[in-house]
Each structure stands twice: as structure tokens, then as C-alpha cells.
């Protein structure tokens, strides 16, 4: 039953980052934001290897923070570099890569867990995150603006945090779209969180 709390902590961590994401992306740049997110996720995964419930909640929150920049930063890169006529196709490939990676993880991680334990599977995930950080280093100089640490404070100002919500609430079509997305995310989260438990404990 604790898995529900862990998933909630992860989702909350992602929401916290997305809430200030517009300002952070402007300061960090898209590639750097993704790399910082990968580092946070890798660290959170390693913390999960310690069997302490309170630490697991914090670790999942950090993993969620690591996931936060992925979509806004990826979309910003897509808008900036993909030709207009190809954006739909490339966006579809980008979106399908997440479930494809999930399937690959679902096929690989149980075998790794059986061979080296659950901790081994978590270390494997952290290593993948680390290798991705290394692989994307050349893209940072090519794609990102220069980093200005002093402007990080302005990036998380009240104005930048509330701007996306005010934009959505200002237009009826955006409100409907946001509500539809919320309901979809709600169902998806419940499905992801409890399906594995149901398969393991109810169906053996």
C-alpha cells in the first residue's frame, strides 16, 4: 500500500519543478535543465536503495523533480530546431519514446533484480541516467544559452510561477484542455501505481 504514497511524492516533485519550469528553462537552457533533471533522478534512485520509508518518500520526490524538466525542455528544443512541417512527426516520436523505454525497462529490470537484487536494478537505472548526462554534454554548448547563476532567483519568482496557470485560466479552450489532461493523468497515474501491485499480489 505504501507504493501509492511513493508515486504521489514523485508526482508532487514533478509538479513543483513544472510550476517554476518556465523561468528555470529560460535561465538554465533546455539541455542543461534535462541534464540537471537526470542527475536528480539518478541520485533519488540511489537513495531508494536504502530500506527506510521516510527516505524513500524523499527519494521519490527528488526523482519526480528530475522528471519535471523533461517535457517542457524537450518541447522547447523541438519548437526551436525541428522544421515546421516535421514537428508533428518528431513530437510523436518523442512522446512514443517514453512508453518504449518503459517497455524496455520492464523487460530488463526484473532480470537484473533477480540476478543482483532490487538494489542492482536501481543502480542500473542510475547508471543509465549518468551515461545520458555524459552523452548530452556536447549538445549543451550547441543548444543552450549562457548560464547566469545570479538569475536563478528571478527564475522562481512569483510572477514566473503563476504565469502558466494564469494563461490557462484566461481562455475557455485552454481550461477545457487542462481539465482533460488532468483527468487523463489521474487515470494514468492510478493505472501505473496499482497495476504492478495487482499483477504481483492478486494474480501471482
Image: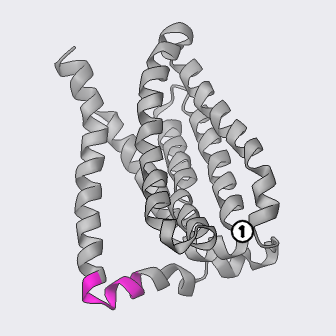
Q: Is residue 13 left or right of residue 2?
A: right
Which residue does the numbered mark 1 point to in the structure image?
A: 28
View extreme (bottom): residue: 170
- Residue under the image location 68 percent in, 54 percent down: 36
From the viewer's perspective, is residue 31 above or below residue 118?
Answer: below
From the viewer's perspective, is residue 92 above or below residue 174?
Answer: above
View extreme (top): residue: 115
- Residue under the image location 58 percent in, 19 percent down: 120
Magenta stretch: residue 201 in it? no
Per the rendered image, the range of residues in magenta is 165-173
**Quadrant of the frame with the N terminus:** top left
Q: Is residue 147 left or right of residue 55?
A: right
Image location of residue 19, percent across then percent down: 49, 71
- Residue under the image location 27 percent in, 28 percent down: 197
Kindly state the secondary structure of the residue where label 1 is placed.
helix
Q: Is residue 7 left or right of residue 146?
A: left
Please tell me how crowded label 1 is: few (under 14), some (14-19), or many (20+) other residues with Cα within 10 Å: many
Image location of residue 161, percent across then percent down: 52, 79
From the viewer's perspective, is residue 12 above or below residue 27?
Answer: above
Main SS category, magenta section: helix
Q: Camera-side residue: 113 or 16?
A: 113
Amino acid at each position: 500500500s505504501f507504493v501509492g504514497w511513493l508515486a504521489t511524492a514523485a508526482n508532487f516533485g514533478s509538479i513543483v519543478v513544472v510550476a517554476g519550469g518556465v523561468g528555470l528553462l529560460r535561465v538554465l537552457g533546455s539541455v542543461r535543465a534535462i541534464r540537471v533533471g537526470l542527475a536528480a533522478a539518478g541520485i533519488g534512485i540511489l537513495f531508494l536503495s536504502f530500506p527506510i520509508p521516510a527516505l524513500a518518500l524523499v527519494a521519490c520526490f527528488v526523482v519526480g523533480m528530475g522528471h519535471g524538466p523533461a517535457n517542457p525542455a524537450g518541447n522547447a528544443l523541438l519548437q526551436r530546431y525541428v522544421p515546421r512541417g516535421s514537428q508533428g512527426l518528431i513530437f510523436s516520436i518523442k512522446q512514443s519514446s517514453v512508453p518504449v523505454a518503459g517497455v524496455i525497462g520492464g523487460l530488463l529490470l526484473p532480470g537484473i533484480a533477480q540476478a543482483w537484487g532490487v538494489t542492482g536494478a536501481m543502480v542500473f537505472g542510475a547508471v543509465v541516467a549518468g551515461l545520458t548526462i555524459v552523452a548530452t554534454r556536447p549538445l549543451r554548448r550547441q543548444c543552450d544559452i549562457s548560464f547566469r547563476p545570479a538569475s536563478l532567483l528571478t527564475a522562481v519568482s512569483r510572477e514566473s510561477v503563476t504565469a502558466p496557470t494564469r494563461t490557462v485560466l484566461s481562455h475557455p479552450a485552454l481550461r477545457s484542455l487542462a481539465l482533460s489532461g488532468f483527468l487523463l493523468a489521474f487515470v494514468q497515474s492510478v493505472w501505473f501505481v496499482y497495476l504492478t501491485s495487482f499483477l504481483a499480489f492478486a494474480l501471482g
